Amino acid sequence: MLMSKQDARQNRNFHPVSAPDFLPLPQLRDLQWQRLRAIVQRADEHVGLYRKRMADRGLKPQDLRGLEDLVHLPFTEKTDLRDTYPFGLFASPMKEVVRLHASSGTTGKPIVVAYTRQDLRVWTNVVQRSLAACGLHEGDIIQNAYGYGLFTGGLGAHYGAEALGATVIPISGGNTQRQLMIMKDFGVTAICCTPSYFLHLIDQSPECGVDIKELPLHTGVFGAEPWTESMRRRIEQDSGIKAYDIYGLSEIVGPGVAMECVCQAGPHIFEDYFYPEIIDPKTGKPCPDGQEGELVLTTLGKQAMPMIRYRTRDITALETGPCECGRTLRRIRRISRRADDMFIIRGINVYPSQIETALLKVEGALPHYQIILTRERGLDVMEVQVEVTPEVFGDTVGALQSLQEKLTKSIETLVGLRANVRLVQPRTLQRSEGKAKRVLDQRKM
Ligand SMILES: [Zn+2]
């Protein structure tokens, strides 16, 4: 159920905190330039790694003449955060750092990020603007089911929602029955969590005697994992809410780097604080607007840990066309692909989101799936397990076979590979209470 453009305009509910979202472009570019100059100066003065890399290129901060010179600066990568663990990229002394977060990290040491008081104000501001952008305001009751703790999701969403004047329920992740009970009993109007966890809540709701469609819940702020447009449609259909995509990453600030407005036309980047570029991930060369590549972000206001040209590994494109909402902030195409999630099978690059799109195209398939990679006699094998509706599962063997063939074909058409599709009963695949793990790679290296 897409909102008509007219509805979107009427629904704009302009909130004063959103004023920077509508800055005329010349002013926005000027603000970005002033902030960029200051941040490069700061990084050069206080962070050894940046100073060295600038020096290696024979660059000084004062060599920058405008925003367009940003392309000459060196990239920063995730490995830089690991290599300088824990505090090597801090540009503020510890006495000015008031908060640390860390990523769980799949291998070895986590990456650590730091915030000064001012950084927390900026973070709160962008999350507040994010929530305002999708129409939330005072009086909304927000169930914050992002994990609280070292992960940036919980506290990031929390302070932004409080600043907005909404009522925050800091429930954190997990304990699905209690989530549903509180959602119903407290009259929750909006929820923040990963899209896969919300699917799980939808799934469990009948057992808990809750009909989500009958609740006051109208908005979902979903992020922290890539998800597809087909997944959005399923969520909206099955719950009757509007599902919005919030984008962020701890290295840059946490949630609130970009957020969709009521037009649902891709997240607007809060460009006054985060400057976006798209590069060719292979060559590192800038891509023209509209072309897909890797998103690179420069923090324009971060004191404790400035990030210059940080390579996010997220694949997207910059949309520069006007948005119906009137924001001048550029949008990114919804990120459904992360370079890190890509797997190679028989020489073909595959993203879990492609499998998701292929599955959800077919009626009878549920948005719960798992990809299992194995190697048989030296050959890569991809098995896709997908839950199907109880109706299909109770149907004839012929009907099941026909669905299996349709799904196999849908994947083959989209990915160019034949997968072994295995239909499983509803609610048999493992659910995640945070970020979904879609791929199980059991191939021995
Ligand atoms: Zn918009």
Image (cartoon, rainbow, N blue to C red):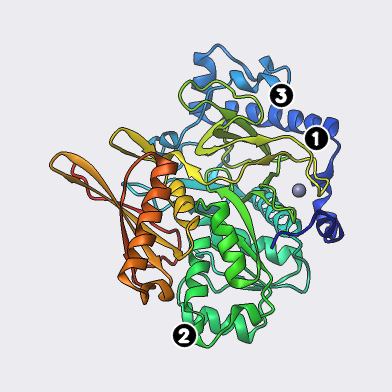
Is residue 160 visible to the viewer in this orientation of the structure?
Answer: yes
Which residue in the structure is indicated by mark 1? 28
| Picture quadrant of residue 359 | bottom left
- How busy is the neighbourhood of tag 3: few (under 14 within 10 Å), some, or many (20 plus)? some
Q: What type is the residue that disc 1 sits on?
A: Leu
Measured as percent of width and height from the top left, residue 231 is found at 54, 58
Marks 2 and 1, how far apart in space? 50 Å
Q: What kind of element bears circle 3?
A: helix
| Picture quadrant of residue 308 | top right
Counting the numbered discs, the total is 3
From the viewer's perspective, is 69 left or right of 385? right
Where is 378 relative to 69, above or below? below
Front: mark 3 or 2: 2
Which residue in the structure is indicated by mark 2? 207
Q: What type is the residue that disc 3 sits on?
A: Leu
Q: Is mark 2 within 8 Å of ligand 1?
A: no
Which residue in the structure is indicated by mark 3? 67
Q: Quadrant of the C terminus?
A: top left
Q: Residue at x 47, y 58 (%)?
A: 362
Q: Earlier in the sequence, mark 3 or mark 2?
A: 3
Measured as percent of width and height from the top left, residue 430 is found at 35, 67
Q: Is mark 3 within 8 Å of ligand 1?
A: no
Q: What kind of element bears circle 2?
A: helix
From the viewer's perspective, is 426 left or right of 300? left
Front: mark 2 or 1: 2
Q: Residue furthest front?
A: 398
Q: Residue at x 62, y 65 (%)?
A: 236
- How busy is the neighbourhood of tag 1: few (under 14 within 10 Å), some, or many (20 plus)? some
Measured as percent of width and height from the top left, residue 407 is found at 40, 55
Q: Earlier in the sequence, mark 2 or mark 1?
A: 1
Q: Nearer the viewer, residue 100 or 188?
A: 188
